[in-house]
Amino acid sequence: CAGEENWVDSRTIYVGHREPPPGAEAYIPQRFPDNRIVSSKYTFWNFIPKNLFEQFRRIANFYFLIIFLVQLIIDTPTSPVTSGLPLLFVITVTAIKQGYEDWLRHKADNAINHCPVHFIQHGKLVRKQSRKLRVGDIVMVKEDEKFPCDLIFLSSSRGDGTCFVTTTSLDGESSHKTYYAVQDTKAFHNEQEIDALHATIECEQPQPDLYKFVGRINVYHDRNEPIARPLGSENLLLRGATLKNTEKIFGVAIYTGMETKMALNYQSKSQKRSAVEKSMNVFLVVYLCILVSKALINTVLKYAWQSEPFRDEPWYNQKTEPEKKRNLFLQAFTDFLAFMVLFNYIIPVSMYVTVEMQKFLGSYFIAWDEEMFDEDTGEGPLVNTSDLNEELGQIEYVFTDKTGTLTENNMEFVECCIEGHVYVPHVICNGQILHDCTGIDMIDSSPGSSGKEREELFFRALCLCHTVQVKDDDSVDGLKKNQMSRRSCIYISSSPDEVALVEGIQRLGYTYLRLKDNYMEILNRENNIEKFELLEVFSFDSVRRRMSVIVKSSTGDIFLFCKGADSSIFPRVKEGKIDQVRSRVERNAVEGLRTLCVAYKKLTAEEYSKVQKLLQSAKLALQDREKKLAEVYEKIERDFILLGATAVEDRLQEKAADTIEALQKAGIKVWVLTGDKMETAAATCYACKLFRRNTQILELTTKKIEEQSLHDVLFDLNKTVIRQNGSLTRDTFSGLSTDTQDYGLIIDGAALSLIMKPRHDGSSGNYREIFLNICRNCSAVLCCRMAPLQKAQV
Amino acid sequence: MAVNYSAKEEADGHPSGGVGVPGGGAVGGGGGGAVKTRKPDNTAFKQQRLPAWQPILTAGTVLPAFFIIGLIFIPIGIGIFVTSNNIREYEIDYTGTEPSSPCNKCLNVSWDSTPPCTCTINFTLEHSFESNVFMYYGLSNFYQNHRRYVKSRDDSQLNGDNSSLLNPSKECEPYRTNEDKPIAPCGAIANSMFNDTLKLYRIDNDTRTPIPLIKKGIAWWTDKNVKFRNPTGDGNNLTALFQGTTKPVNWPKPVYMLDPAEPDNNGFINEDFIVWMRTAALPTFRKLYRLIERKNNLQPTLQAGRYSLDIAYNYPVHSFDGRKRMILSTISWMGGKNPFLGIAYITVGSICFFLGVVLLFIHHKYGNRNTSADIPN
């Protein structure tokens, strides 16, 4: 057990504050903070010193303070009031503003910390203030409530132990995500049962990554050995997220207050400085140097001038006694300071006040702007910080995601292709979708008998290989309601692709009914219900870009169905009509459709048990669980038999093209980052006018790099771009307006990783520079086939 | 313990003002709950539609501006320059550094030489001075603007404050007390008051006729009546009022003996004293000494001819390389002789006019081609 040696790296929580039975591993009890959220910076008594300290950390304020102090100490030509008063004014105004903002934060904190939370104490439901929540408390959250802290999901009112959550306020994704209760506890549905739970949880110390969590729960039944279960991020309900479509859930608090992932994320934000402020600071330093040298020169000149005694002390202007006795060097230093004070106006105090006020007002004007007001949501723009206003006009690059930003993220199943035969579930006519009642529109000739078999398998695979949930309640809005189905039911999924697929399949005659007690029920074309036992789900992740399910059919056969991006499926396929499917996939991609491939594999019982063992060991690991799981997945997901491909249309967002055009007109360069195929992405870009007809496309792709060396390609591109640039400047110089040629760069993930990969000979820095240079000269850059990690690198 | 440590560090290292969202950090999604329904007011101020005017500099507006400035400034400059040139000014340096000068004998004079060293300088006015003539004394290389010097006075003492009279300000050091008695008036400025006596004679057929010099009306009215006042007390006897004080070290006589004949020009309100107390900004300066008023309309104030200046030479300037001058000058509506202002006006006007011509030429030759490039969309 890893708990003993790395206890500092993990924490142990007694669910419901019950001590583990004696004889269990002894843990050193840790102290956890309470659930109070503190976002305010100051308290009542530390406001003045702390605020002053913060304010004097600004170079300008500190400088004026120094000048003021110098004026107080030495015999100065100007009165200390002249610099003290403006400084006092600036400091006071800023302090009042910050104090007011902090007071608002205090109020917000209090509202959060005092909001009532239901939790269970001795088998009864108790209401308490949120801030009194402790680690280990069992909390009940109702629908549409926010989670008060990070919880381990114990059980929900839904029978299958799942719940839906939106994390809009955390990562901006508005889709519903599914979370899973701990297997052993999901049967507990009321307070008494939950209270009887006797378990400890080991988990890692708080860390800000929202999507990472590893832990382990030990459940004690009577006197038996504890049952250990793995906990992952699918069991962790984050503070700030909202519970949806689930009546209530029970969870145990593991991270509270400032240790929740949300709080950790907010704190790690660093202060952003605008370019103006940065350059202002540079100028400040420059002027400071000028001032010092000026004072120095003046001091030297003063002593040179008064070296003759009749100038230093003429008969009409005698020195006083103390002046005569004063040390020469001390006197010179005082003179130097006096000159500093005399010339200190070279750095104006008023400039800072003016800039500050102007920014403050500017932020209000942004908030007041009527044209930014959204009628649909009834919200105007919200100004988070007034420090960066002026930066808004200086944006040069916009990085955009394709899915959900350029497009509506509202998928429509368009067609599927099985073994090279294309099926279209409906035809689009005059913008109306006419559903094909007879079922399938055959484009190719009818497949043979073996094809028929494959076809059915394909549909079943699509029906089974997903994480879609069925919700019978049709009162919930905001979700796509399926009007086609005979029972009114709604599919909910974290990915709209999957919903589109399941709905499309439904139109082809196979209806996914529900998941009940680990059995997936499918209504097939003959209206018979087929049952499949769901054995394992390898959930989708963006590195593998595929997901798999292992199911056991009613006849006892075990199938592994896999669905994923073509690039991740094709290399793993052993047999099937790869070429036909591939050509179809590529054709679809050019049309801007999102494509997915489906494959399957039959497992024997022995194989399955082996797989199960592997998985179990990987899932229980506390450390590197992700890595181990990925390894296991890698081992299992291979030697597929290709079934076919699907195509899903993702419609462009309304006015996306106009927006991009306007952005380009304003000289802002748009980078699109996407995980889609190159052809798909390029088609989308043409559709939304990111690339225009006159745009010259430069391609930096794996294919091209295979032909030439990376070095040559980069240099070629660089030359093209720079030549264009050179002629451009000449053109503008001669005053002739030319139809300037835009460059669009397409780069794919593999090429990018080649560029970014550090080389042993140290030339990588060079490549990077060239690449950057190319990118800077292109008006649009499209990066496709990118893993999210690469997106972050870019 | 690691938990608490890291949490504390995070809390202390809170970003300094970067997250300026009231409640943004804490509430997270909490703020999103309250849906704002208020639409921004459609007012001219909030929508930034207040009338505004911004000068757009084009050739059409700039060129006339240059010509107008040129055409206005050049005549003004010429007028001022002519006026300045019409002012008569005559200046004599009587320091006596040259061995040939009559005042050379007095060069190393000291403050308390009695009787004072006197010298006479003869000079000839080529042109007659028509209107009222102002007589100045001028000093060079005399730093009345030295910080130590400027501060060395007690204004409340000069304003007649009795307590300050006996207890002058510390700023007056080292001219504050002498032999345990407070100095009145204290300070370096008063101590170094100009004390040469200048007398002007007209030489007409070898007879010297003194020219009447008026010593009143040379100080500012506010200085004479507001800023400077004699101490108050019983009676008007200044000697009694200045009881308990002593004269400045360099003065030959106390302040109440400056002009015993005229009580309203004696003590602190002596106009020569007031004029001296208004310190000059530059090391070379002139101060009004006397007025010569025009007698009648038929004769000029000072006819062209020979004159002589009698100097009671008391003021030592040789030790600091200084110079002493006597200046006779008339004035006009724009003050004393000042050719610079007229020259400046003429220069600026000419440059503007010249630039206007150059720009007009450029505009005429190249202007049409760039019109589209002026305003980038």
Image (cartoon, coloured by chain):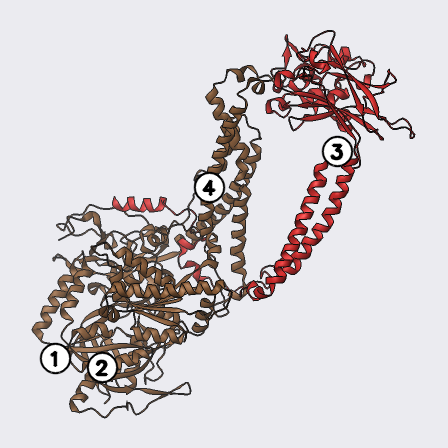
Quick check: do tags 2 and 4 share a chain? yes
User: From where the camera sits, is residue A665 visible?
Assistant: yes
Between A507 and B340, the residue placed more toward the observer is B340
Residue B299: x and y, percent?
90, 28
Determine contact: label 1, label 2, CB under 8 Å.
Answer: no
Determine contact: label 3, label 2, CB under 8 Å.
Answer: no
Chain letter for mark 3, please.
B
Using the image, determine if residue B316 lies above or below residue A682.
above
Chain depicted in brown? A
Mark 1 crowdedness (10 Å alpha carbons): few <14, some 14-19, many ≥20: few
Residue B236: x and y, percent?
81, 14
**Element type where label 3 sits in the image:** loop
Residue A789: x and y, percent?
28, 61
Mark 2 crowdedness (10 Å alpha carbons): few <14, some 14-19, many ≥20: many
Determine contact: label 1, label 3, CB under 8 Å.
Answer: no
Using the image, determine if residue A121 lies above or below residue B183.
below
Chain letter for mark 4, please.
A
Q: Amino acid at mark 1?
A: Gly
Q: Nearer the viewer, mark 3 or mark 2?
A: 3
Cα distance, mark 1 to mark 3? 120 Å
The mark that comes first in sequence, 1 or 4, is: 4
Quick check: do tags 1 and 4 share a chain? yes
- Read off the residue under disc 2: A581
- Read off the residue under disc 1: A556
- Read off the residue under disc 3: B337
Q: Nearer the viewer, mark 1 or mark 4?
A: 4
